[in-house]
Image: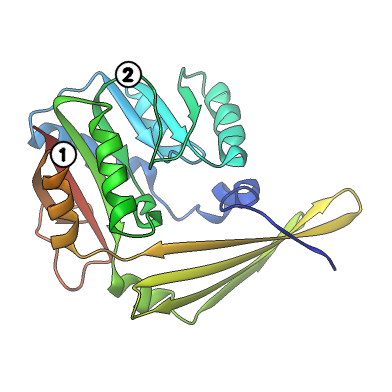
Protein backbone atom coordinates (compact mmCIF):
# COMPACT_ATOMS: atom_id res chain seq x y z
CA UNK A 1 0.00 0.00 0.00
CA UNK A 2 1.34 3.41 -0.98
CA UNK A 3 1.82 5.89 1.87
CA UNK A 4 1.15 9.59 1.28
CA UNK A 5 3.42 11.75 3.45
CA UNK A 6 1.65 14.95 4.46
CA UNK A 7 2.64 17.96 6.59
CA UNK A 8 1.67 17.89 10.29
CA UNK A 9 -2.07 18.21 10.96
CA UNK A 10 -3.13 18.17 7.30
CA UNK A 11 -4.78 14.74 7.57
CA UNK A 12 -4.91 14.69 11.36
CA UNK A 13 -7.48 17.46 10.88
CA UNK A 14 -9.98 14.91 9.52
CA UNK A 15 -10.41 13.26 12.92
CA UNK A 16 -8.70 15.73 15.25
CA UNK A 17 -11.76 16.80 17.21
CA UNK A 18 -12.93 13.21 17.61
CA UNK A 19 -9.52 12.04 18.82
CA UNK A 20 -9.17 14.99 21.23
CA UNK A 21 -12.53 14.69 22.97
CA UNK A 22 -10.67 14.50 26.30
CA UNK A 23 -9.65 18.16 26.07
CA UNK A 24 -11.87 20.43 28.17
CA UNK A 25 -11.87 23.68 26.22
CA UNK A 26 -14.45 25.26 28.50
CA UNK A 27 -12.07 24.81 31.43
CA UNK A 28 -9.24 26.22 29.30
CA UNK A 29 -11.37 29.25 28.44
CA UNK A 30 -12.13 29.91 32.11
CA UNK A 31 -8.43 29.64 32.94
CA UNK A 32 -7.46 32.15 30.28
CA UNK A 33 -10.12 34.55 31.50
CA UNK A 34 -8.84 34.15 35.06
CA UNK A 35 -5.37 35.13 33.83
CA UNK A 36 -6.85 38.18 32.10
CA UNK A 37 -8.44 39.16 35.41
CA UNK A 38 -5.32 38.46 37.48
CA UNK A 39 -3.19 40.71 35.30
CA UNK A 40 -5.85 43.40 34.89
CA UNK A 41 -6.17 42.82 31.17
CA UNK A 42 -9.50 43.62 29.53
CA UNK A 43 -8.91 42.57 25.94
CA UNK A 44 -11.31 43.27 23.13
CA UNK A 45 -9.23 41.83 20.28
CA UNK A 46 -7.56 38.43 20.76
CA UNK A 47 -5.36 36.47 18.38
CA UNK A 48 -5.30 32.69 18.70
CA UNK A 49 -1.99 31.58 17.20
CA UNK A 50 -1.82 28.00 15.87
CA UNK A 51 -5.58 27.90 16.39
CA UNK A 52 -6.13 24.44 14.92
CA UNK A 53 -9.81 23.65 14.38
CA UNK A 54 -10.74 26.69 16.52
CA UNK A 55 -12.24 24.80 19.46
CA UNK A 56 -10.83 27.33 21.94
CA UNK A 57 -11.22 30.25 19.53
CA UNK A 58 -14.94 29.58 19.21
CA UNK A 59 -15.40 29.32 22.98
CA UNK A 60 -13.80 32.75 23.38
CA UNK A 61 -15.77 34.23 20.49
CA UNK A 62 -18.98 33.08 22.17
CA UNK A 63 -17.79 35.01 25.24
CA UNK A 64 -17.74 38.21 23.20
CA UNK A 65 -14.05 38.57 22.28
CA UNK A 66 -13.19 39.68 18.74
CA UNK A 67 -11.23 36.64 17.68
CA UNK A 68 -8.67 36.13 14.94
CA UNK A 69 -6.99 32.82 14.23
CA UNK A 70 -3.75 31.88 12.49
CA UNK A 71 -2.99 28.29 11.44
CA UNK A 72 -0.46 26.76 9.06
CA UNK A 73 -2.33 23.50 8.35
CA UNK A 74 -4.87 24.09 5.59
CA UNK A 75 -6.78 20.98 6.65
CA UNK A 76 -7.26 22.42 10.15
CA UNK A 77 -8.31 25.81 8.75
CA UNK A 78 -10.96 24.19 6.56
CA UNK A 79 -12.49 22.48 9.59
CA UNK A 80 -12.22 25.70 11.60
CA UNK A 81 -14.21 27.63 8.98
CA UNK A 82 -16.95 25.02 9.00
CA UNK A 83 -17.16 25.04 12.81
CA UNK A 84 -17.21 28.85 13.04
CA UNK A 85 -20.10 28.96 10.56
CA UNK A 86 -21.96 26.24 12.47
CA UNK A 87 -21.62 28.22 15.71
CA UNK A 88 -22.58 31.47 13.93
CA UNK A 89 -19.50 33.33 15.16
CA UNK A 90 -17.35 35.75 13.20
CA UNK A 91 -13.71 34.69 13.40
CA UNK A 92 -11.14 36.12 11.03
CA UNK A 93 -8.98 33.20 9.95
CA UNK A 94 -5.58 33.39 8.27
CA UNK A 95 -3.14 30.89 6.90
CA UNK A 96 0.23 31.47 8.53
CA UNK A 97 3.16 30.07 10.50
CA UNK A 98 3.67 31.22 14.09
CA UNK A 99 7.35 31.87 13.32
CA UNK A 100 6.79 34.34 10.48
CA UNK A 101 3.18 35.51 10.13
CA UNK A 102 2.28 39.08 9.18
CA UNK A 103 -1.24 40.46 9.72
CA UNK A 104 -0.52 44.22 9.85
CA UNK A 105 -2.62 44.43 12.99
CA UNK A 106 -2.05 44.55 16.75
CA UNK A 107 -4.10 42.74 19.38
CA UNK A 108 -4.89 43.29 23.04
CA UNK A 109 -3.90 39.70 23.84
CA UNK A 110 -2.35 36.79 21.96
CA UNK A 111 -2.72 33.10 22.81
CA UNK A 112 -0.77 30.05 21.70
CA UNK A 113 -2.09 26.95 23.43
CA UNK A 114 -1.92 23.17 23.65
CA UNK A 115 1.88 22.99 23.38
CA UNK A 116 1.97 24.55 19.92
CA UNK A 117 5.06 26.44 21.12
CA UNK A 118 6.90 23.10 21.34
CA UNK A 119 6.81 22.91 17.54
CA UNK A 120 9.53 25.57 17.46
CA UNK A 121 12.53 23.46 16.44
CA UNK A 122 15.15 25.27 18.49
CA UNK A 123 15.83 28.44 20.45
CA UNK A 124 16.22 30.50 17.28
CA UNK A 125 12.79 29.49 16.07
CA UNK A 126 11.29 30.10 19.50
CA UNK A 127 12.81 33.57 19.55
CA UNK A 128 11.31 34.18 16.10
CA UNK A 129 7.88 33.26 17.46
CA UNK A 130 8.25 35.66 20.39
CA UNK A 131 9.44 38.49 18.15
CA UNK A 132 6.65 37.93 15.63
CA UNK A 133 4.07 37.93 18.41
CA UNK A 134 5.56 41.16 19.80
CA UNK A 135 5.02 42.82 16.42
CA UNK A 136 1.31 42.00 16.69
CA UNK A 137 0.73 42.81 20.36
CA UNK A 138 -0.38 46.15 21.76
CA UNK A 139 1.96 47.71 24.35
CA UNK A 140 1.17 46.20 27.78
CA UNK A 141 -0.69 43.40 25.98
CA UNK A 142 -0.58 39.85 27.31
CA UNK A 143 0.94 36.85 25.60
CA UNK A 144 -0.40 33.61 27.11
CA UNK A 145 0.99 30.26 26.02
CA UNK A 146 1.86 26.84 27.37
CA UNK A 147 4.52 24.18 26.86
CA UNK A 148 4.54 20.47 27.44
CA UNK A 149 7.26 19.23 29.76
CA UNK A 150 9.90 16.54 29.60
CA UNK A 151 8.13 14.73 32.43
CA UNK A 152 4.90 14.60 30.42
CA UNK A 153 6.64 13.24 27.34
CA UNK A 154 8.72 10.64 29.20
CA UNK A 155 5.87 9.48 31.46
CA UNK A 156 3.05 9.42 28.94
CA UNK A 157 4.45 9.23 25.39
CA UNK A 158 8.03 7.94 25.11
CA UNK A 159 8.17 4.51 23.42
CA UNK A 160 4.38 4.29 23.52
CA UNK A 161 2.01 3.52 20.68
CA UNK A 162 -1.66 4.46 20.62
CA UNK A 163 -4.16 3.21 18.06
CA UNK A 164 -7.87 3.30 17.41
CA UNK A 165 -10.16 1.90 14.72
CA UNK A 166 -13.36 3.54 13.44
CA UNK A 167 -15.75 3.09 10.54
CA UNK A 168 -14.19 5.86 8.46
CA UNK A 169 -10.64 6.05 9.80
CA UNK A 170 -7.94 4.26 11.75
CA UNK A 171 -4.88 5.82 13.31
CA UNK A 172 -1.60 4.58 14.78
CA UNK A 173 0.35 7.03 16.94
CA UNK A 174 4.00 6.15 17.70
CA UNK A 175 6.25 8.26 19.91
CA UNK A 176 9.95 8.39 20.67
CA UNK A 177 11.80 10.90 22.84
CA UNK A 178 15.46 11.71 22.24
CA UNK A 179 16.87 12.83 25.58
CA UNK A 180 20.07 14.38 24.17
CA UNK A 181 18.28 16.70 21.76
CA UNK A 182 15.15 17.03 23.94
CA UNK A 183 13.07 16.24 20.87
CA UNK A 184 9.95 14.11 20.77
CA UNK A 185 9.23 12.56 17.40
CA UNK A 186 5.72 11.34 16.69
CA UNK A 187 4.78 9.33 13.62
CA UNK A 188 1.06 9.38 12.94
CA UNK A 189 -0.32 6.93 10.40
CA UNK A 190 -3.90 7.36 9.22
CA UNK A 191 -6.08 5.11 7.11
CA UNK A 192 -8.94 7.29 5.91
CA UNK A 193 -11.93 6.00 4.00
CA UNK A 194 -12.25 7.44 0.51
CA UNK A 195 -15.18 5.81 -1.23
CA UNK A 196 -14.85 2.04 -1.01
CA UNK A 197 -11.15 2.17 -0.15
CA UNK A 198 -8.93 3.39 2.67
CA UNK A 199 -6.00 5.62 1.76
CA UNK A 200 -2.88 5.62 3.94
CA UNK A 201 -1.35 8.91 5.10
CA UNK A 202 1.60 9.58 7.37
CA UNK A 203 2.62 12.67 9.33
CA UNK A 204 5.84 13.23 11.26
CA UNK A 205 5.58 15.63 14.20
CA UNK A 206 8.57 16.96 16.14
CA UNK A 207 8.26 18.79 19.45
CA UNK A 208 11.15 20.34 21.32
CA UNK A 209 11.25 20.54 25.11
CA UNK A 210 12.32 23.94 26.45
CA UNK A 211 13.47 24.72 29.98
CA UNK A 212 11.57 27.44 31.85
CA UNK A 213 14.74 29.51 32.22
CA UNK A 214 15.31 29.37 28.46
CA UNK A 215 11.75 30.49 27.73
CA UNK A 216 12.00 33.40 30.17
CA UNK A 217 15.38 34.52 28.82
CA UNK A 218 14.06 34.52 25.25
CA UNK A 219 10.94 36.42 26.34
CA UNK A 220 13.09 39.12 27.97
CA UNK A 221 15.27 39.30 24.88
CA UNK A 222 12.16 39.90 22.75
CA UNK A 223 10.85 42.78 24.85
CA UNK A 224 8.52 41.06 27.32
CA UNK A 225 8.27 40.98 31.06
CA UNK A 226 7.62 37.35 32.12
CA UNK A 227 4.74 37.47 34.62
CA UNK A 228 4.32 33.82 35.60
CA UNK A 229 5.04 30.19 34.81
CA UNK A 230 2.24 28.20 36.41
CA UNK A 231 1.35 24.57 36.72
CA UNK A 232 -1.47 24.29 34.19
CA UNK A 233 -4.93 25.47 35.27
CA UNK A 234 -3.58 26.83 38.55
CA UNK A 235 -1.89 29.90 40.01
CA UNK A 236 0.77 27.66 41.54
CA UNK A 237 4.39 27.87 40.43
CA UNK A 238 5.41 25.07 38.08
CA UNK A 239 7.23 22.12 39.63
CA UNK A 240 9.00 18.95 38.59
CA UNK A 241 5.69 17.11 38.47
CA UNK A 242 4.08 19.55 36.04
CA UNK A 243 2.95 18.00 32.77
CA UNK A 244 2.14 21.37 31.24
CA UNK A 245 3.36 24.85 32.15
CA UNK A 246 1.39 27.98 31.34
CA UNK A 247 3.33 31.18 30.75
CA UNK A 248 2.01 34.72 30.84
CA UNK A 249 4.15 37.60 29.60
CA UNK A 250 3.49 41.30 29.16
CA UNK A 251 4.89 43.28 26.26
CA UNK A 252 6.86 46.28 27.53
Which sits in the foreground, 26 or 13?
Answer: 13
> Where's residue 2, x and y in %?
83, 65
Q: Which label sits in the foreground, 1 or 2?
A: 2
Within the image, what quadrant is residue 142 found in? top left
> Where's residue 201, x and y in %?
72, 59
Q: Which mark is residue 35?
A: 1
**Label 2: which secondary element:** loop
The residue that label 2 is drawn on is 105
Residue 251 in view in this figure? yes
Up-down relation of residue 100 to residue 190 (above or below): above
Within the image, what quadrant is residue 157 found in? bottom left
For marks 1 and 2 on the same chain, the one whose residue lies earlier in the sequence: 1
Up-down relation of residue 107 to residue 74 (above or below): above
Graded by Cα atoms within 10 Å as few (under 14), some (14 to 19) or many (20 or more), the crowding at tag 2 reads: few
Q: Residue at x 20, y 65 (%)?
A: 211
> Where's residue 197, x and y in %?
89, 56
Q: Residue at x 60, y 28 (%)?
A: 82
**Left or right: where does residue 235 sit relative to residue 190?**
left
Amino acid sequence: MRTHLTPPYEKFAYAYDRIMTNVNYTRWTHYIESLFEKYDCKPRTVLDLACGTCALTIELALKGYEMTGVERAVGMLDIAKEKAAAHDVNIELHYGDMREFQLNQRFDAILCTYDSINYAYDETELSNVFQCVAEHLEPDGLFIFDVTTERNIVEHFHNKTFASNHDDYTYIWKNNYLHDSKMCQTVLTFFIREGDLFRRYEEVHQQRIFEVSTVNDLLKGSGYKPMSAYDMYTFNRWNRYSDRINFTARLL
